[in-house]
Image (cartoon, grey):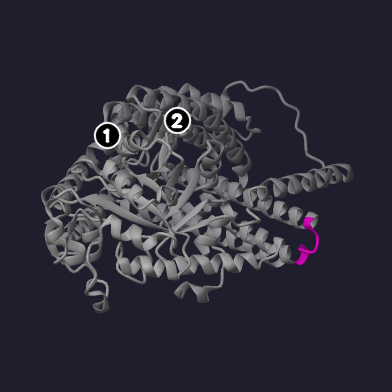
């Protein structure tokens, strides 16, 4: 194989000469992908969910959906459509460079026709790659399944115990998993570099799809390290370019936007222009990454092939006659472009800022009490939450062996007391002897597992209570018992109920139809209107404006968990969430107070930072609260 400099020279030459045709081809395929895949995947998924027998899937439902035959069918079909279009896109892009060797003006229709003419062999070789990749993944999935069995099925401990205590078996499984992950990545890289020439072999040498992978591996033999360096170099260059370009856009926004805050109209325009530039820069970088990869791939392939091996007869295909035209930049065109840019920037700015919450209306919910200042789900944590000015506390309830409702999160006491005892096997007499505070700090050694009744007595008149129903497959009459206890304390108007288990919510609806209930979830798929809940408690890692907007249109509030840093709190409050579940209620209160002191332009700048993917800089000194 030739040294890197000649290859680099060829790549640079080809890219500089044909980047326009490459970019146009890529844009066309992106449009085709959007137009075809968006409705098809949406329809496919809705039909699959209907066949599954549900209108809305959340968390575990989604997991079991994709583990089942219907989910696999949905995944394989959608993935196949996407991979097929990506493969055809690469086929068309790679045709651009050899087509230019005829020394005539390239017509984009030729390369598109070429790609479609080779669609079936391209799809065949792509399918073979996917099949071999799945076979390669299978042993690693089996190892992951064994690790899951060892940790969670055989030992039956809570995930919180493993994450906090990190017992030897957890560290051993984690170490083995890390080694397997490295091996898995190496194997994938070996496969990828071996198959790098399969597509061009099918396209330009008419190699049969059944032989393409084998012949590609033979061509790459002895050169995989060099090929890998080229691919890794391309990936690093793309990443660095993206980071630099985004940093420049952010710097320009930070420099210019604050200087026009005296006028709201100018502020809208400045923010809209910033977003337009940001979108254009991201599109340009994406086009550059895809087209440069194709140029690299074709030139690497060309260094392994003899010119006589390449079938380029298709370049002579008739092309529509076209008159060469050269775009002229005139004053009138500049004026029109300027007017359009101003209108577009202002429109984008107004639309982007419509979602800004200028008046914060959010409830602060202390997660298991003030659980960063006191041991979770204890009387001490509740008292601290009241002191920290939380609006509500969130607690977890379960049943004991003797039918009492207690406030406790894990299924066992391994994490908080080092005891291998399940909560449903313990009686109240057992719980009175278990110290659940010393693990947090010595001064909490007297803390015990409280009953729901004791917590409600502490909260009445001081703070609202969000009761999460914990179900580990052992609950018997949890919903009815919770309802009875709440009513004994006359606190029905001061509590809400939530659970990860949809069946538990339905049972609570039957027991107390007029109570406020919410679904606890990380992700969802389907129609939110169909879920019989008053609010959604969503994992903060998965929240976005569309989900918030959809929930509000469905008449449901959105609570977000568990958020413990000031910038994220501020961003989510700006999105318009209804409740913030946090281990640090005092920090959340201080964030709200700081936001209340901000002017409208300052709020808009915070929102701009969020849209650009930059963490807003709320005063870091309060992060220690």
Q: Which mark is residue 359?
A: none
Sort mark 2 into few (<14), some (14-19) or many (20+) by Cα contacts within 10 Å.
few
Picture quadrant where residue 197 is located: top left
Give how far across and how far down residue 101 sits, in percent.
57, 36
Q: Nearer the viewer, residue 1 or 377?
A: 377
Is residue 289 shown left or right of residue 602?
left
Residue 171: say if magenta: no
> Is residue 371 visible in the rendered structure shown here?
no
User: Which residue is at 27% across, 72% downward?
Assistant: 440
Q: Nearer the viewer, residue 467 or 146?
A: 467
Is label 2 in a helix, a strand or a loop? helix
Dots 1 and 2: beta carbons under 8 Å?
no
Which residue sits furthest right? Answer: 331
Is residue 119 shown left or right of residue 13?
left
Give how far across and how far down residue 521 sits, in percent.
38, 45
> Which residues fall within the magenta stretch?
259-264
Which residue sits furthest bottom? Answer: 443
Q: Nearer the viewer, residue 68 or 473?
A: 473
User: Which residue is at 47% across, 28% downward?
Assistant: 42
Is residue 297 shown left or right of residue 256?
left
Q: Which mark is residue 530?
A: 2
Q: CA distance from mark 1 to mark 2?
A: 23 Å
> Is residue 604 visible in the rendered structure shown here?
yes
Q: Which mark is residue 67?
A: 1
Q: Earlier in the sequence, mark 1 or mark 2?
A: 1
Residue 531 to residue 493: above or below: above
Is residue 388 shown left or right of residue 76?
right
Picture quadrant where residue 477 is located: top left
Q: Nearer the viewer, mark 1 or mark 2?
A: 2
User: Which residue is at 61% across, 30% downward?
Assistant: 108
Sort mark 1 into few (<14), some (14-19) or many (20+) by Cα contacts within 10 Å.
few
């Amino acid at each position: 194989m030739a040294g890197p400099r000649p290859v680099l020279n060829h790549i640079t030459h080809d890219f500089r000469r044909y980047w326009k045709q490459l970019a146009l081809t890529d844009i066309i395929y992106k449009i085709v992908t959007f137009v075809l895949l968006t409705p098809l995947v949406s329809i496919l998924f809705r039909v699959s969910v209907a066949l599954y027998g549900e209108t809305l899937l959340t968390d575990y439902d989604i997991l079991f959906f994709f583990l089942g035959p219907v989910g696999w069918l949905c995944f394989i079909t959608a993935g196949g459509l996407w991979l097929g279009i990506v493969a055809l896109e690469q086929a068309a892009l790679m045709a651009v460079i050899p087509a230019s060797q005829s020394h005539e003006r390239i017509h984009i229709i030729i390369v598109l026709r070429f790609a479609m003419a080779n669609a079936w062999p391209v799809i065949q070789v792509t399918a073979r790659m996917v099949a071999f990749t799945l076979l390669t993944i299978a042993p690693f999935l089996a190892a992951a399944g064994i690790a899951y069995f060892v940790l969670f099925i055989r030992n039956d401990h809570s995930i919180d115990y493993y994450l906090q205590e990190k017992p030897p078996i957890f560290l051993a499984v984690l170490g083995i998993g890390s080694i397997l992950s490295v091996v898995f990545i190496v194997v994938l890289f070996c496969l990828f570099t071996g198959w790098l020439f399969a597509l061009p072999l099918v396209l330009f040498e008419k190699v049969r799809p059944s032989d393409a992978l084998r012949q590609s591996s033979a061509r790459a033999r002895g050169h995989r390290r060099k090929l890998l360096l080229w691919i890794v170099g391309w990936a690093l260059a793309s990443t660095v370019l993206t980071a630099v370009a985004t940093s420049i856009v952010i710097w320009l926004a930070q420099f210019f936007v604050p200087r026009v805050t005296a006028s709201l109209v100018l502020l809208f325009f400045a923010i809209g222009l910033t977003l337009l530039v940001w979108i254009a820069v991201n599109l340009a970088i994406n086009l550059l990454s895809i087209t440069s990869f194709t140029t690299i791939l074709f030139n690497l392939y060309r260094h392994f092939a003899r010119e006589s091996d390449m079938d380029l007869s298709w370049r002579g295909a008739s092309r529509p006659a076209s008159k060469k035209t050269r775009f002229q930049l005139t004053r009138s065109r500049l004026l029109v472009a300027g007017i359009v840019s101003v209108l577009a920037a202002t429109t984008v700015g107004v639309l982007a800022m419509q979602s800004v919450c200028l008046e914060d209306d959010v409830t602060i919910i202390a997660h298991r009490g003030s659980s960063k200042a006191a041991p979770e789900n204890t009387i001490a944590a509740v008292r601290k939450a009241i002191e920290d000015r939380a609006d509500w506390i969130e607690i977890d309830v379960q049943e004991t062996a003797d039918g009492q409702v207690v406030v406790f999160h894990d299924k066992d006491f391994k994490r908080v007391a080092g005891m291998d005892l399940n909560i449903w096997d313990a009686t109240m007499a057992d719980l009175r002897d278990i110290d659940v505070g010393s693990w947090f700090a010595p001064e909490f050694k007297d803390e015990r597992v409280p009953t729901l009744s004791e917590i409600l007595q502490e909260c009445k008149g001081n703070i609202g209570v969000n009761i999460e129903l914990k179900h580990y497959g052992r609950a018997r009459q949890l919903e009815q018992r919770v309802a009875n206890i709440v009513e004994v304390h006359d606190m029905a108007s001061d509590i809400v109920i939530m659970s990860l288990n949809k069946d538990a919510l339905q049972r609570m609806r039957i027991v107390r139809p007029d109570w406020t209930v919410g679904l606890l979830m990380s992700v969802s798929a389907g129609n939110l209107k169909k879920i019989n809940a008053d609010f959604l408690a969503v994992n903060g890692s998965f929240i976005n404006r569309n989900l918030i907007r959809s929930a509000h249109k469905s008449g449901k509030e959105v609570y977000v968990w568990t958020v413990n840093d000031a910038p994220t709190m501020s961003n989510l409050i700006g999105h318009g969430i209804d409740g913030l579940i946090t281990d640090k209620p005092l920090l959340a209160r201080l964030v709200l107070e700081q936001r209340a002191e901000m002017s409208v332009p300052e709020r808009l700048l915070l929102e701009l930072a969020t849209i650009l993917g930059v963490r807003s800089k709320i005063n870091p000194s309060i992060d220690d609260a």
